[in-house]
Image (spheres, helix red, strand yellow):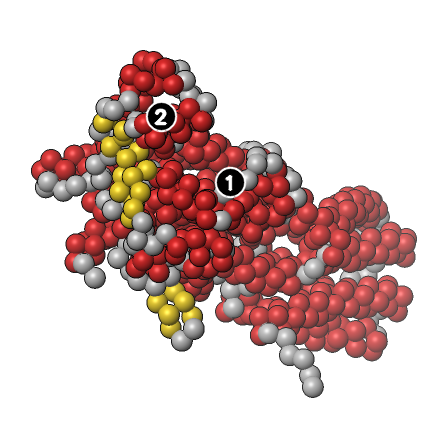
Amino acid sequence: MNFKLPSLFSRTSKVERNIDDFFDRVVVAGLLFRQAMQLYIDQGICAEFEDKMARVEALESESDQLRRAIETELYVHTLIPDLRADVMSLLEDVDVLINLFEAGLFKFHIERPQFPAATLPELNRLLHTVCECVELLVTAARAFFRDIQAVRDHNCKVQLLETEADKLSTALLRRIFNSDLDIAHKVHLRYFVERIDELANTAEDISDRLSIYAIKRRI
Amino acid sequence: MDLSFIFFISSGLFLGWSLGANDAANIFGTAVGSRMLRFSTAALVCSVFVVLGAVIDGAGAARTLGSLGGINQIAGAFATALAAALSVFMLVRIGLTASTTQAIVGAIVGWNFFTGALTDTDTLLTILATWVLCPLLAGLFAVLLSRAVEFGLQRFQPHLLTQDSWTRLALIVTGAFGAYTLGANNIANVMGVFIAVSPFQDLDMSGVRVSSTQQLFLLGSLAIAVGVYTYSKRVMLTVGCKLLQVSPVSAWIVVVAHSLVLFLFASQTLERQLIDWGLPSIPLVPVSSTQAIVGAVIGIGLLKGGHSVNWRLVGRIGCGWVATPAVAALICTLCLFVLQNLLHLSVARPQRYLISTAVMERLQEQGFDAAALQPLSAIEYPSARTLITSAQRHLVLDNAAQQALLHASYLGDFFLNAHKIGNLDRQWFSQAQWQALNALAGHRFEYRWQLAQALAALTPAWRHRPDRAANKYFNQDLHQKLSHLYRIFES
């Protein structure tokens, strides 16, 4: 005979699963973004890049659905009434990151910016730093639901990596604008460097808000 | 049932209503205010458990309250309950938090003042001490529980949503426990003063015995339930949002701390266990749930550094605590004046004190100076106050000596009517005690101590035991039973 949990607890388990699935999708989208960008740097636009871009697009759509389902459950069943608004803001903020991954890949696919070979090592470092920053932000967001003490540690790392990303992007932009490229090309590349750096900036903004939510969550 | 009893008891029901509207809101205020529970759920759970607590476990605190003032006429009981209810209602209307417990104690002191009865200062001081002890204890419990819960949450790290579900369930369970203890502890405030004048008879419904006191308490608890449904929502939201913004977990901690304090002061089982272990017992007195909640909330606030506590509101609440008993005593005195002098109703049974030869001998046995007592003998005193005033011209009397003198010289007519014996709560007495009581059916006594002596002569079960820790509970219990008999059999 199957033991059935009371509806209150089974509903809670379902929402918990949905939240975990949502964060899983953000993490996977981040990994795919990193791989796709690596492919772009190494080979330019290729079939594999397009495949990864399509997967990120699908993940973005799924995460939107999950977020709406979570929203509905939280509001219809008045779960976590004191922190509901914070949780919704957090999920919406994190959802912005997956949108940025998707939009970034689309922009690269459409505009195909040409980075000089000399800038590639710095672009690579910027890419890895930014992706790591986003991954840590997702870890911090997950910790908000289970291990409130750990949020602060993860947020500290997010802020450190964001500063690192800022330095890398500034150095990269300086190298681009010191080069012999024509000005239109320079401006075009600046747009993409800033687009990648925006991921780290967004992650830091979310981590700032997450710190406040974590303080509010204390008993 | 006598129609006049229904009229008089209406003031008790009014008091019950205000208790339901205000004090019951304390239990579920934070849960409803933080939207963890719907008002309808909270009101239903609260009402059911208040009724259960009052009927099943309400007798303990009711007996202690009875010893503060022996209100023995229904008009006096009416005025006392009405004064308490009016003072609570008025203070709440002008925006101050009122405590029903303090109101009823103030009203009883007002009755004692008006009728010339002497307030038992020891009992009064015990109750006053709990007014300080209760919020302190609730605050301490809240701090300890907070630490324990924080440790538990860090150790087990439940998901936020799982924690939310468990908190919701815990709020319902502890709210029910809180409502039960509220009913057990505070029904004495609502109906305690009517026990002596209750016209109810014990009922035996297919083996289930419902005593007259339980029927009276059922009526009072239903009035509390009506108060919960009709007026507590607004108060719940005020308690839940204005006093301090607490998280659902803190809301639960506050309710648990408050319930534990109320349970400590209402549980006869716990009192007996403490005495058995040779530990100091906690007095069974009605304590204020408002004080317990405020104490617990301040405890939580102080743990967080004290910045988030609305100290201004706390100050206003403190003013309310001071004002409540004073206002109640004043209103009670005014009500009694109107009832006695304008409506010509008897608000207290006439009291007579006479130091006869038998009394003189008894007092000498208790260590009183015979020569000093001689000028007081053979004079009938119309009130406790006049006797004590006269006695103090010849003797130095502390509170215990005053009580002993009043107890020994109180002249009454104690008739052990067989019908009244039959109406007593049989379960409360031992076999030997019950047999002795029945053996004295039809006997009449002038003094209370003569009744006690006659019972003691029949069986050791009615005799005081030597003052030792092991005998403390027995002697306390015997004293309560005898006091109850004096009230019931005085005609």
B262 vs B22, nearest the viewer: B262
Q: Is B170 in front, or is B206?
A: B206
Specify the farthest residue to the top.
B393
Which percent across, then down, holds residue B171?
A: 54, 58
Q: Counting other residues with Cα less than 10 Å from the Cα at mark 2, is it few (<14), some (14-19), or many (20 or more)?
A: many
Q: Chain of mark 1?
A: B
Output the chain of dot 2: B
Helix or strand or loop: what does disc 1 sit on?
Answer: loop
Query: Where residue B431 sits in the image (x, y, percent)?
Result: 49, 58
Q: Is residue B239 left or right of residue B133?
A: left
- Marks 1/2 in contact by CB < 8 Å: the verdict is no
Asked if B351 appears above or below A28 in the picture, the reply is: above
Q: Residue at x 38, y 47 (%)?
A: B484
Q: Which residue is mark 1?
A: B464
Q: Of A130 and B7, which appears nearest the observer?
A: B7
Residue tagged 2: B360
Question: Mark 1: which amino acid?
Answer: His
